[in-house]
Image (tube, rainbow, N blue to C red):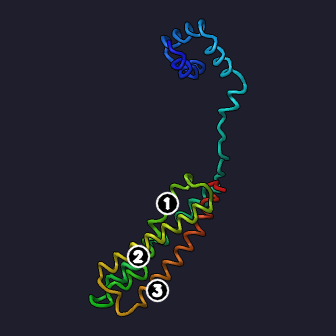
Amino acid sequence: MDCNVVLDLLPLYLDDCCSAESAELIESHLKNCKSCSKALENMKGKDFCEEVSISVPEKISRIEQFKASLIQSVALFVSFALIILGVTFESVTPLGSSNGNWAYMLIVPATAFMVSLANWYFVRFYKNTKVFSWFSSLFNFMFSLCGFAWAVIHYGNFGENFLYPGIGAFVALVLCVASKILSSFYAKCMGKE
């Protein structure tokens, strides 16, 4: 049996996780090969175990998990309520140049905020809280831009003037800042530094 194959199988042999046939082959090889026998002894030693130890993140307390869940739930509820409010007002707006004003002011910013909350499910992949909060705010901003572009294409105008899109841009900015602050707090609750 080739030494490279035996070295690959040694961790399985050591943990008694290989088949009986593989164990027999490894044992017969170890009787004749001093370098593989030495490698097995090194794996059994203390140095090898310390070398491959994996640090486990600290356990998140139930209170911190509750806070994180509460923040996420409230953010989802508020964004959904703003969308419902905007759709309700938009549905009673007569067709014409004022149609789309509520989409600019509430529906687009709130939808962008709600969609950006999907990033929160990937908090563990971010390096730290600061990076996570900036990306959350950036996602919110990008979704807002896409939403405003959709609204311009869909409604074909900015309403009677730039007041309503301006209000919508201000609401989107407020929600971007809220996204940064809330995501930072959420990440800290989830154990990010």
Image coordinates for residue 7, horizontal then vertical, percent:
56, 20
As shown in the figure, which amino acid type bears the numbered disc 1?
Asn
Residue 80 quadrant: bottom left
As shown in the figure, which amino acid type bears the numbered disc 2?
Val
Which residue is found at the position 46% from the left and 68% from the top? 114
**Mark 2 surroundings within 10 Å by alpha-carbon count, few (fewer than 14), some (14 through 19), many (20 or more):** many
**Mark 1 surroundings within 10 Å by alpha-carbon count, few (fewer than 14), some (14 through 19), many (20 or more):** some
Image vertical order of residue 3 relative to residue 128, above or below: above
The answer for how far apart the CA atoms under marks 2 and 3 are is 11 Å
Residue 87 quadrant: bottom left
Give the side of residue 162 with respect to residue 180, left or right. left
User: Which residue occupies the foreground of this view, 37 or 140?
Assistant: 37
Image vertical order of residue 68 relative to residue 153, above or below: above
Q: Are marks 2 and 3 in contact (CB under 8 Å)?
A: no
Which residue is found at the position 27% from the left and 90% from the top? 96
N-terminal of the pair, mark 3 or mark 1, is: 1
N-terminal of the pair, mark 1 or mark 2, is: 2
User: Which residue occupies the foreground of this view, 90 or 180?
Assistant: 180
Give the side of residue 164 with respect to residue 68, left or right. left
Q: Which residue is mark 3?
A: 167
Q: Which residue is mark 2?
A: 108
Q: Which residue is mark 1?
A: 119
N-terminal of the pair, mark 2 or mark 3, is: 2
Give the side of residue 143 with respect to residue 178, left or right. left
